[in-house]
Amino acid sequence: MKILKWVGWISLAVGASLIVLGVITQLFRIRPFRVEHNISYIHMATSFILLTIATFIVKKDCCKGDCKKNEEIK
């Protein structure tokens, strides 16, 4: 489950950096990656942030209590 935790934190970092990049491009009118619309950064960022939320929900539900007990029930 450590991998899910790392994937969640990495996707959160990417999402946050895309939001910052979108704000910078809006303020200074620069296009570092040749993206024509500033809203594209926000759309990409929300996708990564939703991925973060989903991985932490899956991690929380999967590791409730003792994992050995969960395997015995199935």
Image (cartoon, helix red, strand yellow):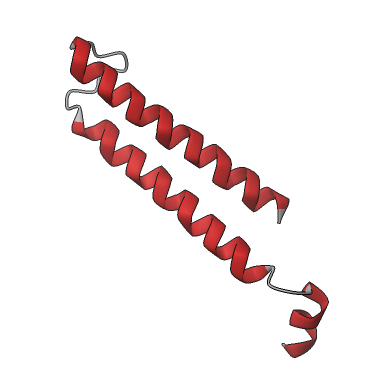
Measuring 50% from the left and 34% from the top, which residue is drawn there?
Answer: 13
Drawn side of residue 21 relative to residue 60, left or right: left
Give percent across and percent down for residue 70: 74, 81
Q: Reply above or below: 33 against 71.
A: above
Q: Quadrant of residue 25?
A: top left
Measuring 74% from the left and 89% from the top, which residue is drawn there?
Answer: 73
Drawn side of residue 51 relative to residue 62, left or right: left
The C terminus, quarter of image: bottom right
| Residue extending furthest toward the front | 65
Q: Quadrant of residue 38?
A: top left
Q: Quadrant of residue 9?
A: top right
Measuring 33% from the left and 22% from the top, which residue is drawn there?
Answer: 21
| Residue extending furthest toward the bottom | 73
Drawn side of residue 60 relative to residue 22, left or right: right
Q: Reply above or below: 71 against 19.
A: below
Measuring 28% from the left and 25% from the top, which residue is drawn there?
Answer: 22
Give percent across and percent down for residue 18: 37, 29
